Amino acid sequence: MVRSRHQLVERLALVFHDWWATRRDGVSTNAEMLNQTNIFRAHGLGSFRAMARAVTTDPAMLQFLDGMSNRRGAVNENYGRELMELFTLGADRGAYTETDVREIAKALSGWTATYSNGWTNWRWDEQGRWDFSTKTVFGKSGRFTWEDAVELVLTHPLHPSFFVRKLWGYFIPTPPSAAESKALEQLYVASNLQIRPVLEAILCHPAFYEGPTMVKPPVVLSAGMLRAQERTVATYNWHYVGDRSGQQLHFPPDVSGWNDLRWLDTNTTVGRWDLVREGLRGKVITGTARDTYPEETPEQALANARAFWGDPSLSAETVGQLKAFATAAPITGTTTQMAQRRAQRFNALRQLVAASPDYQTC
């Protein structure tokens, strides 16, 4: 997200990392987590069907939700349940029953791998591990395979509405009206489950520009600060501070992903202040530069602080508060002391701009 020229691709990689949430501590290698992210990059603007098939057979997901433990005679329901509840249909909508969970888990059985200093040779063992019995899912019966299981959930009548509302929620905080949802669902089905047309419609919707703001996820906030300064991720601190602010990549809290309604609380707000401080690391005016900081009016100090972050849009209320702070800052003492206090004011203003409600939301 920081260094790519394809920002939408990277933003969608984060969206689908949250959608198909997988934790590194349930996966054997970093490479497998990175490979899963590449699935989201490859399919984020393409076919949701292709993405669902790729994630279902992905080694990271097969480990995290016990797909490799799901075999004939010892069926594991974890992935089958989450495939319907969290990834394609949604809970408490009448989309499926417990029988459907058990039966689709049988269809998803059969995956295995060879262990030799790590898992290799991932494969579907049709003869030895797949449950070849006849299954009944959503009232349909057959000797369903994993491919059939994916197709069954994606052709379920309630999948389009789930998909549209979930994708919409990543960009617009208020849910679509029934008419808006229906139109997007029709677009999705008509495009053969392509993500791009629906996303384009969402990003062109007036509510995206005129509706309520959303709190930026910590990773989005961090990437924006670094891009504003044309910097790259050069320290592990972003990983640790990200955790304190509520979002550590590859470590979602659980299989349901991050809860966007909990980005701001008494713990994560402090973490966000630390994120801004990390964004200013190495940029704080100290030493000789502080002792010789040039003269500037409160208005100039605020303008320079805003320019440092790429002149973000700020409300009149926020600008008023920042201007009042800049004006009230005591610039007194000897020539050196006044220079130091002007530098201190500028440092503080940069922190306050990026920590302001306007900068923290979008």
Image: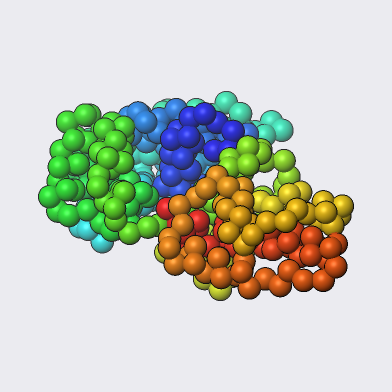
Residue 335 in the figure: left or right of residue 70: right
Residue nearest the observer in this picture, 189 or 196: 196
Task: Give the residue drawn at x 42%, y 53%.
Answer: 362
Q: Estimate the x, y position of residue 198 in percent, counting from the top left.
A: 26, 37
Q: Estimate the x, y position of residue 312 in percent, counting from the top left.
A: 50, 50
Q: Estimate the x, y position of residue 48 in percent, counting from the top left.
A: 33, 34
Residue 71 in the figure: left or right of residue 50: right
Image quadrant where one finds the N terminus:
top right
Please say which color scheme the image uses: rainbow
**Viewer can see residue 83:** yes
Residue 146 vs 335, above or below: the answer is above
**Viewer can see residue 125:** no
Q: Estimate the x, y position of residue 4 in percent, counting from the top left.
A: 55, 31
Residue nearest the observer in this picture, 323 or 37: 323
Residue 44 vs 283, above or below: the answer is above
Residue 162 in the figure: left or right of residue 22: left
